[in-house]
Amino acid sequence: MSSFSYVAAAIVLFTIVLGNTNAQLSPSFYDTTCPDAYSIVRNVVEKAQENDIRIGAKLIRVHFHDCFVNGCDGSLLLDDADDIDSEKNGAPNLSTAGYPVVDDIKTALENACPGVVSCADILAIASEILVSANGGPTWEVQLGRRDSRTANRAGTTAIPSPFETLDQIAKKFADAGLDSTDLVALSGAHTFGRARCATFVHRLYNFSGTGNPDPSLDTTYLETLRQTCPQGGNAGTLANLDPSTPNGFDHNYFTNLQKNRGLLQTDQELFSTSGADTTSIVDRFANSQSEFFDSFAKSMINMGNIKPLTGSDGEIRFDCKRVN
């Protein structure tokens, strides 16, 4: 066989293997083994939202942070153990929250379908339900992930940081197989939720050591943020990521960026970075909520496909906090 034939055969084999891997995730994965899985998750998260309007933002963030470390495998949910250094101890995850609700979902699913629905899939299902419940799009959640038996605290450096440049964040997305449209669309999840003063106060008083605020900040918005986060104030104080409609899932995040009212530096850089391909994407989403919703749904599916464990890999945890 010629070298060309070997290469061609290898490409065909790779395509078949990749196709089979992707085919293992399916929206109908639990139709026979746990047909009420979706409604069980919905019942738990809807009750949780009655007590915590931020639970949607919290759980989609956990899903995002989980997928960026070793893929969507539920590894972030593991607590410290003898052979587990929890990813929750990594700097990007110290402010993640919502874990008790994940435990409540898992308990309800175990009561109905013991050992069937993975913790990794719980995050994917809950994220879709809560985005939709807050006015956002729906999509067919791809299911069939299994749970990791390990955690990777060191790997949490792969999670995008609010202090990084657009180029640095774009590289992290590219490393995960996601493109600029995914980056902008998934950033749109900041249309609901909150951020601590510690993540943006550097923009208010001494940006990049200049002694002045970030010049890309709208001056009226700057004064509002300074009232929320005074110099020397409580770094844990929360501010709305979307000052216009903080609890609804809509495209106002993008119209805010056009007005220089992005809360995080990494939010505003999507629009304000000269020559960046993300600027035109922000404009498209600001001009059309339906286009944002369509792209967000596709990007959530793309993110959920980052290196899932399937087949006989990993396990189905009985308790999301610990391996079986």
Image (tube, helix red, strand yellow):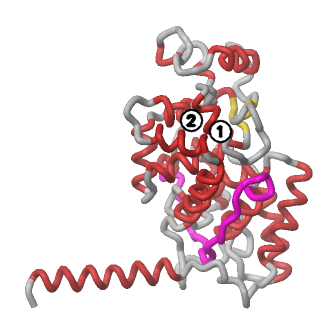
Mark 2: which secondary structure? helix
Mark 1 nearby-residue class (10 Å; few <14, some 14–19, many ≥20): many
Q: Quadrant of the C terminus?
A: bottom right
User: Could you tell me residue 6's position as x and y percent?
Assistant: 16, 84
Name the residue at 78% across, 74% down: 38
Q: Is residue 286 left or right of residue 115?
A: left
Query: For the magenta stretch, what is the residue range?
Result: 131-155
Can you say which quadrant of the picture contains the N terminus? bottom left
| Residue type, numbered disc 2 | Asp
> Which label is found at residue 253?
1
Report if the CB atoms under discs 1 and 2 are less than 8 Å apart: yes
Please name the amino acid that badge 1 sits on. Tyr
Please state the horizontal and vertical placement of residue 301, each as a whole percent of the image: 57, 65
Indicate the position of residue 264 as horizontal and vertical percent values.
59, 31
Q: Residue at x 20, y 82 (%)?
A: 8
Q: Which residue is mark 2?
A: 267
At 84% across and 47% down in the image, what residue appears?
53
278 or 15: nearer the viewer: 278
Q: Nearer the viewer, residue 84 or 40?
A: 40
